[in-house]
Image: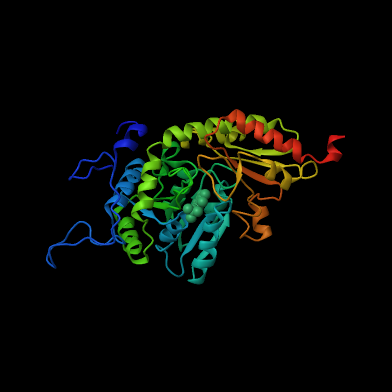
Amino acid sequence: MSHLETDLLHQGEFCDKQYNSISTPIYQTATFHSEGPDSNPEYKYSRYSNPTRKALEDSLNALEGGFQAFATTSGNAAIHLVLTLLKSGDHVICGKEVHGGTHLLIKDLMGKFGVEATFLDLQDIAAVKASVKTNTRIIWVETPTNPLLKTVDIAAMASIARHAKAWCVVDNTLMTPFWQRPMDFGADIVVYSSTKYLNGHSDVISGAVVAKTEHIANQLQYWVSLLGVAESPTDAWLVLRGMKTLPQRLKVHAYNTEHIVDFLVNCPYVKNVHYPGLADASQWELFNKQQKSFGGIVCFEVDLDALDLNTFIKSLEYFKFSHSSGGTISNISYPWSTSHNCLNEDVRRSAGVTPGLLRLSPGLEHYDDLIKDLQRAFNLAAKECVLV
Ligand SMILES: *Cc1c(COP(=O)(O)O)cnc(C)c1O
């Protein structure tokens, strides 16, 4: 294998045999005709498989070190697809700080079909071991966690899963294979919202599942074809194109984030900054083993007595208030009322989502402009009683 920068440009890509185009064509077709009933062409119907989608899947699979990848219509569709591996009476262990949709699909959708779930802090390895039951089939990991960005030990989770004859699933959306390869630490399945960094341009909703073994892949292939959750050729092409610049984009996202963290830790309106680079030393060994960067997201808690949160958000020019992350344009979100608002208040608070918590996903602007933007908004939103 060459360096990832090189592989991303060459893996999975294939030229059309007719004209030798350098870019993978978009095979925008519902079906493929064949000679007749006795022939068995590679592609039959785009709900099952499609050459453009296959190029994306092969690229992602090679980067991740899996057996087979599946590109889906959204990150949530990818999560749902993995959950089809379960049956009534099974049990899932899931981190309590995960994407809100993951929590609800496990609790509400799978709950309807008789799947039990335990949500807990996966940094507490003893508690995870203690919560394993004879019917545990999946340990669902998100690391760094969302939104507090704590590091979960993938190898420890995979080892507990292996002993329980369960699968270790890792949602690798925030790290991507450039910074973290969960299968190197024993994960059986990796899940993505490629809406975020993989595509990276905020112009497509998309997801993916990578399976480590043929056994898992065969089951997923069955369900992906049947459910109709496979990604459209055009959306797959957009993700494939976005991924070509993944390493270059990620380096800038991480660099900008580091500068913004330096600014936030010295800011009088900020009570608490959550960023892996600020974690206490006990985390560092795990961190160095598992991931290659502190990432491109930072969360912080503002002092609501000193700052008007609404004015702060509305005063920002470059940080757009929206529901996503990982795009070229900087994003600010408010987990309390957006990504985590579907959870009840107790669950939110226990996952560290408080009314003063904000999340930044710095884009590719110059960090200097981003810091000035934050400073200006802090000044405008400062409550007067604090200024005097
Ligand atoms: C956004 C997100 C999802 C859901 O992905 P969609 O593409 O919005 O369906 C899942 N997991 C994580 C970690 C996410 O950030």
Residue 133 visible here: no
Tell me: 272 left or right of 173.
Answer: right
In this view, the residue in front, 322 or 342, is 322
Tell me: 121 left or right of 24.
Answer: right
| x, y percent for residue 291 | 48, 36
Residue at image point 22% right, 57% down:
43
Considering only vertical position in the picture, is 265 above or below 137? above
In this view, the residue in front, 283 or 43, is 43
- Picture quarter containing residue 301? top right
| x, y percent for residue 277 | 58, 33
Residue at image point 71% right, 34% down:
376
The N terminus is located in which quarter? top left
Residue at image point 17% right, 45% down:
18
The C terminus is located in which quarter? top right
How many marks do you count on the picture? Answer: 0
Residue at image point 54% right, 66% down:
108
Tell me: 382 left or right of 244.
Answer: right
Q: How is the image coloured?
A: rainbow
Tell me: 373 left or right of 199.
Answer: right
In this view, the residue in front, 24 or 231, is 24
| x, y percent for residue 328 | 50, 39
Residue 359 visible here: yes
| x, y percent for residue 118 | 55, 60
Considering only vertical position in the picture, is 202 above or below 227? above
